[in-house]
Image (cartoon, rainbow, N blue to C red):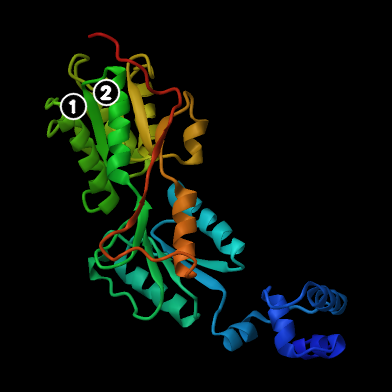
Amino acid sequence: MSKVGIREVAKLAGVSTGTVSRVLNDHPSVTKDLRARVTAIIKDLGYTPDPSARSMRGKVSRLIGIVIPDLTNPFFAELVQSAEQAAANHGYNIIVMTSFDHAAKEADRIKQLTSRKVDGIMLVPSNDFHTLQLPKGLPIVVVDRLMPGYSGIAADHRNGVRLGVEHLLQLGHRRIGFISGPGHSVPANDRLRGYLDAIEQAGDTRTAGSPLIAEAAFDYESGRSAGNYLLARARNERPTAIFASSDQQAIGCMRAAHDLGIPIPAALSILGFDGIPLASMTTPRLTTVKQPIQDIAAAAVAVLLNKQTAPDLDNPILFACEILKGETTAPPQPD
């Protein structure tokens, strides 16, 4: 049996193919009765629109490309899931590709998506994005790792960390250790600046620029190693609280404290950053600064589809973070 086409639907409904197309695209000019009649015929005939034909006629693919550095990172996985839901709300699908945090692979992924005629690309750049040349004429929104000269959407990393440090200061902590992210990472540097801002504002110079700062990758094992480094000192010298730049780091740091016999939060408070679902599954439950991942993804999709004004090149959209209080922060014990 040959596949039913749009012409058969139009002929049976007594309308033009253009009218059928307007029904399929939910155009407001179609009356309620006509929409019901055409929809019923489409259902009876089992007609399924050809996406490629529709994209050729309408010059849209109804596809959004997403390029991320690493799909195994829970933050990026949640970002993709949120973007997929936001795209679906507008009748679009997504294509996801990973750059493995490498600029050359990233350029290749963008080239592939461009050849597939996607309607726009949501890009989380690799950390060596300085060598990347983005194509002209295709809507591209940079997310999380902001790039100079491009529209960007991200969490307010700097103020988010300040919020977290202030939470620890209010509990009475003064020796606050910090596990920063990789030095070449834009969000990591913003988070480190937020930490230093808060310490300076508190008028306490014992932490800033001291060994209580450890640089690490954003993953679990790096957080564990950084935790061991910060905690391998006398009790009256080690931090009473550690703020990690990612939840994965924080969970690794929790393991380091456990291995050293340091109870959480009785003898050590730990605070994470991101607000990934895994943070609520630890024992004790991790206190974390949550990024509004769903809001970031929805805004990026809306900008790509011209549902929202694109941010100015040098004025990105920054979403505020919030603290999700768990069970890993408490006032410090006296030395």
Of 201 and 121, nearer the camera is: 201
Is residue 15 positioned above or below 232 on the image?
below
Q: Is residue 72 visible?
A: no
Q: Which mark is residue 202?
A: 1
Residues marked 2 and 1 touching at CB (< 8 Å): yes
Is residue 35 positioned above or below 309 on the image?
below
Q: Quadrant of the C terminus?
A: top left
Of 306 and 220, nearer the camera is: 306
Q: Mark 1: few, some, or many residues within 10 Å (few <14, many ≥20)?
A: few
**Quarter occupied by residue 93:** bottom right
Is residue 21 positioned above or below 314 on the image?
below
Q: Amino acid at mark 2?
A: Leu
Q: Is residue 101 visible?
A: yes
**Quarter occupied by residue 273:** top left
Name the residue at 37% across, 14% down.
Answer: 266
Residue 242 percent coordinates (x, y): 29, 28
Q: Is residue 267 left or right of residue 309?
A: left
Mark 2, secondary structure of its residue: helix
Q: Quadrant of the N terminus?
A: bottom right
Q: Which mark is residue 169?
A: 2
Residue 134 percent coordinates (x, y): 32, 74
